[in-house]
Amino acid sequence: MNSGAVIFAANVDRVARFYEVLLLMSPVHVDTGLRVIASDRTELVIHQVPPHILPPVPEGTVPTPREDTAIKPFFVVPSLAAAREMAPLLGGYLFPREREFSARRFRACNACDPEGNVVQFRELLLPPT
């Protein structure tokens, strides 16, 4: 079994597609209001919530970051530059390049998925040991 997270979304397909492409994941289970995507190490469950709890973000609208949550997941991507180019095509965005930082063995930047969930993407600078 993989480690992972559950992400609640108004538009399951749109949010799942964002993570599938940027994190190089594949669908492993699709059902009404639920999509499970995975890589060899991580599994994300994208779970629908009713619109009265989480109104949908219209396509073409830049999502407002939801920064008042108690948790922010991070994910390794092959390239922050490639993620920065691709994210807007999928409805999200990476924060400006000036906000990138380096720590330990990675460079990182916060991002918003299509519904404003703030996550961090990390590009490895050295091979893991």
Image: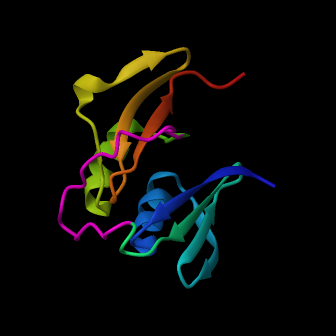
Locate residue 45: give its quadrant: bottom right
Locate residue 92: give its quadrant: bottom left
Estimate the x, y position of residue 56 in percent, counting from the top left. 31, 70
Looking at the image, residue 95 sits to the left or right of residue 21; the answer is: left
Identity of the residue drawn at 49% across and 41% down:
78
The residue lying furthest to the right in this view is 1
Of the pair 124 and 15, the residue shown nearer to us = 15
Identity of the residue drawn at 66% across and 50% down:
4
The residue lying furthest to the bottom in this view is 32
Estimate the x, y position of residue 40 in percent, counting from the top left. 71, 53
**Is residue 127 depicted above or below 67 in this figure?**
above
**Is residue 114 depicted above or below 96 in this figure?**
below
If the image is split into quadrants, where does the N terminus sit? bottom right
Looking at the image, residue 118 sits to the left or right of residue 64; the answer is: right
**Is residue 108 depicted above or below 92 in this figure?**
above
Of the pair 60 and 118, the residue shown nearer to us = 118
In this picture, which residue range is highlighted in magenta? 54-73
Looking at the image, residue 89 sits to the left or right of residue 110; the answer is: left
Query: Magenta span: helix, strand or loop, mainly?
Result: loop
Q: State the scheme by which the image is colored.
A: rainbow
Identity of the residue drawn at 37% across and 75% down:
51
Estimate the x, y position of residue 58 in percent, counting from the top left. 22, 70
Residue 111 appears in view = yes
If the image is split into quadrants, where does the C terminus sit? top right
Residue 82 appears in view = no
The residue lying furthest to the left in this view is 61
Indicate whether residue 61 is drawn in magenta: yes
Looking at the image, residue 50 sits to the left or right of residue 105; the answer is: left
Indicate whether residue 48 is drawn in magenta: no
